[in-house]
Amino acid sequence: MSQLDRVRAAFAAQGFMRTLGAALVALEPGRCEIACDFRADLTQHHGLFHAGVLTTLADNACGFAAMSMLPEDCEVLSVEFKTSFLRPGAGLAAIARGEVLKPGRTLSFCRADVHMRQPDGREALAATMLATMMAARPDAR
């Protein structure tokens, strides 16, 4: 099984991604794109995407981008991240695009941008994340 197939399988195994209705829409070494359609049960009190949903999408986009570059016996865990919200999470869907900025044997440094798809098809940047991901072997958890 290729590393990209392992990433797809890991994404499919995440119950929380299924709960959100998120989909893995693009994957290549060092890059990952995840989309989530707007639903009322994913909102905060103003009817916008909840910041936790946007952060989760960005975290997963970073993590799976990093995992796509690791050896086949490695998984990935978040070490730390910082999310900046640039505008409200208003739109038909949230699209998180993650990329590895600097891969490493133990730590990988990543970035994700979360765009909101608008009714006219354009995208508006709503959040950006900088994250550090750690390579982890399942037997060492």
Image (cartoon, grey):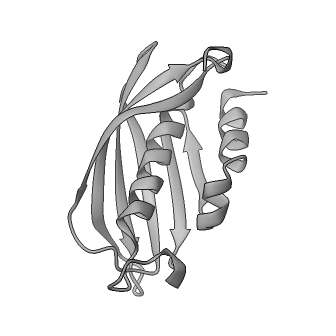
Task: Name the image quarter holding residue 24.
Answer: bottom right
State the quadrant of the N terminus: top right
x and y percentages locating residue 84 in the rendered image: 22, 55
For image coordinates 45% across by 63% down, the residue present is 53
Above or below residue 36? Residue 113 is: above
For image coordinates 59% across by 56% down, the residue present is 25
Left or right: residue 25 versus residue 125 is right
Left or right: residue 16 versus residue 114 is right
x and y percentages locating residue 37 in the rendered image: 54, 74
Above or below residue 7? Residue 97 is: below
x and y percentages locating residue 141 in the rendered image: 60, 21
Left or right: residue 62 versus residue 75 is left
In-front residue for pair 39/1: 39
Q: Is residue 39 visible?
A: no
Q: Please state the total of marks drawn on the protein image.
A: 0
x and y percentages locating residue 110 in the rendered image: 36, 35
For image coordinates 39% across by 70% down, the residue present is 50
Left or right: residue 24 versus residue 105 is right
In-front residue for pair 16/84: 16
For image coordinates 68% across by 40% down, the residue present is 10
In-front residue for pair 114/46: 46
Q: Is residue 130 visible?
A: yes
Residue farthest to the right, as pictured = 1
